[in-house]
Image (cartoon, grey):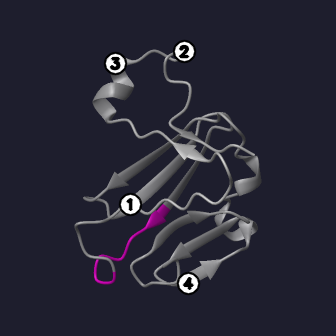
Amino acid sequence: SINSQFTVGWFGFNQTYQHGIRNGNPTSHGYNSNTIATNDVLYMTFDCDKKQIELFHEDTNKRHILTVNTDKAPLPWQLLMMLTDKDDCVRILSPHKLHSMNKIQMDSSIERKT
């Protein structure tokens, strides 16, 4: 559930959730879900050492970082993807594959079809 103390991430309607607390004010966190379009390339990084997750939007060159409180969300972390629209899809690539593929082959890491 997005309201769980374990949930940290970015959602539609410009919302972030951190440990059950919703923040829908893009002015405070800088995340604008409306800038994500079909075939955009986004990178999500889980940094367990720094206790944070990062979302990087290649087309806008914007980086969003959320801190994870490991007292509330201990390791190992689990990935939750919520696809709500018809034809939404996600392609997950390992860092090794990202480096071995060229830009043309890597058409999208995460796609959102509208």
Residue situated in front as seen by the camera: 44 or 86: 86
Specify the quadrant of the image occupied by residue 46. Answer: bottom left
Q: Which residues are magenta?
A: 66-72
Specify the quadrant of the image occupied by residue 50. Answer: bottom left
How far, Cα to Cα, is label 4 from label 2? 39 Å
Task: Judge from the rendering whether residue 55 lies leftward or rightward of residue 77; answer left or right.
Answer: right
Name the amino acid, label 1. Leu
**Secondary structure beneath label 4:** strand
Name the amino acid, label 4. Ile
Q: Which mark is residue 21?
A: 4
Q: Which residue corresponds to mark 1?
A: 79
Task: Judge from the rendering whether residue 74 lies leftward or rightward of residue 28; answer left or right.
Answer: left
On screen, 105 above or below 6?
above
The residue positioned 44% from the left and 63% from the top of the image is 80
How far, Cα to Cα, is label 1 from label 4? 18 Å
Sequence-wise, the earlier of marks 3 and 1 is 1
Name the amino acid, label 3. Ser
The residue positioned 32% from the left and 54% from the top of the image is 47
Disc 4 crowd rating (10 Å Cα; few below 14, some 14-19, many 20+) is some
Sequence-wise, the earlier of marks 1 and 4 is 4
Sequence-wise, the earlier of marks 2 and 1 is 1
How far, Cα to Cα, is label 3 from label 4? 38 Å
Residues marked 3 and 4 touching at CB (< 8 Å): no
Q: Which residue corresponds to mark 2?
A: 104
